[in-house]
Every structure is written in structure tokens, then in C-alpha cells.
Image (cartoon, rainbow, N blue to C red):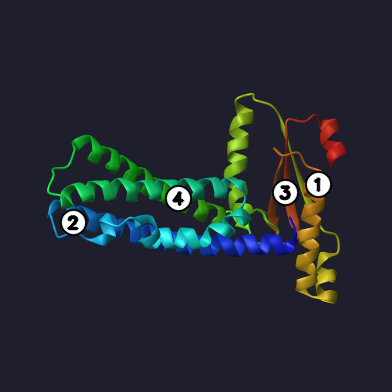
Amino acid sequence: MSVDAIETTLVLEEQLLHEIVAAGRAHRGWLTRWHRQLLCRLPPNAEFSGPNGHGECRFGKWYDASIASFRDLGPEACKSLHLLGRLHLRVHEEGRRLSETVDHGSGVDVRAYDAFAQTAEAFVRATLEFERALRTRLADHDPLTDVANRRSMDTRLEDELERLREGDGSAFLAMLDVDHFKQLNDAFGHQVGDEVLRRVVAQIRGQLRPYDMLFRYGGDEFLLCLRDVTLESAKRIL
């Protein structure tokens, strides 16, 4: 991934977290108003019985306006966001049908209400889970080099140690640093130093397998965890 792409993705993720928190909160407010409308049998309201509830809701407006930028966030984030979009559409479609039933003076079918409640709960749960995943990524991620940071390292190496204690495979750890990095920073400035670190990481990643782990330990120091290799294989990779 290029430097520009890394920086673009990080900005998008930070913006996405802010926006999805606000949009999720707004939608929970919509759900409260929907129940009030239904239970109190208030006069018809286009907010709940209109033909395009998804597009008029704050969450739906944000989603439709932002969907073109989702592709820059990677496949997992895109998959989660498209699931949220489908669930949100279903919430409004099922909610509209129930609102129309009440507006026409009919009672609410229990099975139809239960289906709506399950969809609404699934949407809220998926939104909160996505928020948590995004917060964790931003907290455990080094924004400069686009690798896991030291905080994430502690947790993931504990999991790896537990795997090894159970006799499942092998692992080798290696520390790397950039020779004369301080002199480089002093001579050319930190912006050039940052670019060097990004390019070093790109070179390291080119030698690793998908299931090896790379962490920024601090400054110009990195830690590698090579999984399920022999000592000779680890030496060759290094």
C-alpha cells in the first residue's frame, strides 16, 4: 500500500468512526420515536410511513452519501458496512409496514412486530460491533507505518504464547532496527525519516507470509513473529 493510500485510509477510518457514532445515535432516537408513534397511536407521520424512510433517516443519508468511499477501507470494512446498509433498509421497510397498519386503524400482528424487533436489534448490535472494531483498530494500529503497534503486540503475542503452550506449532521472534536512523533524521528531517520507515516496512512485508506478524516496537524498532517455521527457515527469511 502506498504512503498516500495509507494516510487516506487512516483519515477515512477516523472520520468514519465519528460519523457512524453520530448516525447510530440518531437512529436509536428514530427507533424511540417510532415506538412512541405506534404505542400512542399518534396521527400519521411521514417519518415512519413515508416510502423512502431509509433515504430520509440521518443514518441512511450518511450511508448513501458515503458509500462510494467505502471501497478505500478494505474488504472487511466494506462487507460490514454493506451489511449495515441492508439491515437499515429492512428496519425502515418493516417499520413502515407496521406504521401503515396502525394508520389504517388495524392492530399490529405479533409475528410482524417480532420480526421488526429482531431486525432493529440486529442493526443496533451490528452498528455497535462495528464501532468497537473500528475503535480497536485505531487504538492498536500505528498510523505512520500501517502495522500493529506495541499495545496490540502485547495482546497478540500472549495469544501466540498460549498456542505454543498447547503444543500447536512453533514461532520465532526477531527484533529489527534501522541503522543510523538518528543521523538520517538529524540530516534530512523527520519527514524524510517517516518516509524511510514506511519504505522499510514495505520491504519487510514483501518477505513475510500472510500469517506472520509485524509490530512497530517503537521509534525505528520493529518486532517480527514468524509462525510455524524451522530455525533454518526463519534464518532464511531474516
Numbered disc in front, either 3 or 1:
1
Q: Label 3 vs label 1: CA separation?
A: 15 Å
Give residue 234's position: percent from left, percent from top.
82, 36
Residue under label 1, please give it. Answer: 206
Q: Amino acid at mark 2?
A: Gln
Binning the other alpha carbons within 10 Å of mark 4 as few (below 14), some (14 to 19) or many (20 upward) gives some
Whether 95 is drawn above or below 142: the answer is above
Q: Label 1 vs label 2: CA separation?
A: 58 Å
| Tag 3–tag 1 contact (CB < 8 Å) | no
Q: Is residue 4 left or right of residue 108?
A: right
Residue under label 3, please give it. Answer: 223
Q: Label 3 vs label 4: CA separation?
A: 38 Å
Residue under label 4, please give it. Answer: 85
* Residue 144 seen: no
| Tag 1–tag 2 contact (CB < 8 Å) | no
Q: Label 1 vs label 4: CA separation?
A: 35 Å
Give residue 39's position: percent from left, percent from top.
14, 51
Residue 216 or 182: which is nearer the viewer? Answer: 216
Quadrant occupied by the C terminus: top right
Mark closer to the chain start, 3 or 4:
4
Mark closer to the chain start, 1 or 2:
2
Q: Disc number at residue 37?
A: 2
* Residue 234 seen: yes
Residue at the spot 72% in from the left edge and 64% down from the top edge: 4
Binning the other alpha carbons within 10 Å of mark 1 as few (below 14), some (14 to 19) or many (20 upward) gives few
- Number of numbered discs present? 4
For label 4, the SS is helix
Residue at the spot 46% in from the left edge and 53% down from the top edge: 131
Q: Is residue 136 left or right of residue 143?
A: left
Q: Amino acid at mark 4?
A: Gly
